[in-house]
Image (cartoon, helix red, strand yellow):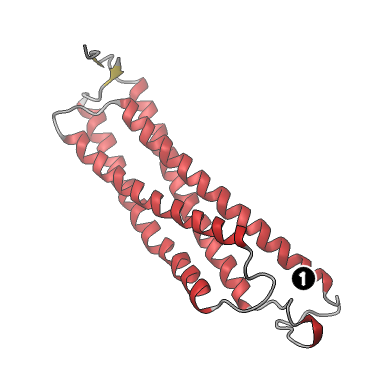
């Protein structure tokens, strides 16, 4: 037995909220999220310089997984707008369970993407910290390419990678906030709705 959304006030309110936050999340991730994609594309296509940081396969795989999660949450935000339209159609009725599951899944995917991004940032920052601690503490040159230490230099490419990760994390956090708010509104509407259920199928 599933409770269906038939109350006119709940339908109008939930449709408006899902449509508004769905479009806000979609365009925010499409605009802000395109920046880390462009930065990562530039990094992998044009900035592959020799050194120990290049070829760290785990970071590349995690970066790709983080971008996939970002693309999925963008698609999921667009799904919120489609769900808002379905709420306004007379039949078939949308159940509260479907609303809650949709918002919950959006939050889970955004959390997974954030875990990927935070793991990459931890690895990258730890690697950079190791380089800086191994250098003379009186001052650290931006580029160090002389002598036997030419394989352990740090350049602006490393900052480019971290900037892409920060932007990705911001978009994932924003979508998580939107999804949690939609989850809250769906649960609140379900708790205050009349007891209307979908009869079980034979």
Residue 86, placed above or below residue 8: below
Residue 156, placed above or below residue 100: below
Q: Position of residue 150 (x, y in %)?
A: 74, 82
What residue is rendered at 36% in x and 36% in y? 102
Q: Quadrant of the N terminus?
A: top left
Q: Position of residue 80 (x, y in %)?
A: 31, 43
Residue 166, placed above or below residue 112: below
What residue is rendered at 38% in x and 32% in y? 101
Tally the numbered discs: 1
Q: Is residue 30 left or right of residue 161?
A: left
Nearer-the-camera pick, 68 or 12: 68
Sort mark 1 into few (<14), some (14-19) or many (20+) by Cα contacts within 10 Å.
some
Among the 4 quarters of the image, the one containing residue 47: bottom right
Among the 4 quarters of the image, the one containing residue 153: bottom right
Residue 86, placed above or below residue 115: above
Q: Which residue is mark 1?
A: 131
Q: Is residue 150 left or right of residue 170?
A: right
Nearer-the-camera pick, 9 or 95: 95
Q: Is residue 48 left or right of residue 123?
A: left
What residue is rendered at 34% in x and 53% in y? 26
Q: Quadrant of the C terminus?
A: top left
Q: Residue furthest left?
A: 90
Q: Is residue 183 left or right of residue 139?
A: left
Q: Position of residue 6 (x, y in %)?
A: 21, 24
Q: Dot 1: what SS?
A: helix
Among the 4 quarters of the image, the one containing residue 154: bottom right
Q: Residue furthest bottom?
A: 146
Q: Position of residue 18 (x, y in %)?
A: 30, 41
């Amino acid at each position: 037995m599933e409770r269906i959304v038939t109350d006119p006030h709940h339908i109008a309110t939930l449709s408006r909220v899902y449509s508004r936050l769905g479009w806000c999340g979609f365009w925010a991730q499409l605009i802000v999220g395109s920046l880390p994609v462009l930065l990562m594309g530039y990094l992998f296509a044009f900035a592959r310089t020799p050194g120990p940081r290049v070829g760290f396969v785990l970071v590349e795989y995690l970066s790709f997984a983080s971008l996939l999660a970002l693309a999925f949450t963008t698609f999921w935000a667009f799904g919120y707008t489609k769900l808002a339209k379905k709420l306004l159609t007379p039949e078939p009725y949308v159940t509260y369970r479907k609303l809650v599951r949709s918002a919950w899944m959006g939050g889970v995917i955004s959390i997974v993407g954030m875990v990927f991004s935070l793991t990459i940032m931890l690895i990258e920052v730890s690697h950079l910290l190791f380089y800086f601690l191994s250098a003379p503490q009186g001052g650290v040159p931006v580029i160090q390419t002389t002598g036997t230490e030419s394989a352990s230099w740090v350049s602006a490419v490393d900052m480019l990678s971290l900037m892409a990760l920060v932007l990705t994390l911001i978009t994932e956090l924003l979508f998580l906030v939107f999804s949690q708010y939609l989850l809250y509104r769906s649960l609140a509407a379900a708790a205050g709705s009349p007891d209307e259920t979908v009869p079980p199928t034979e």
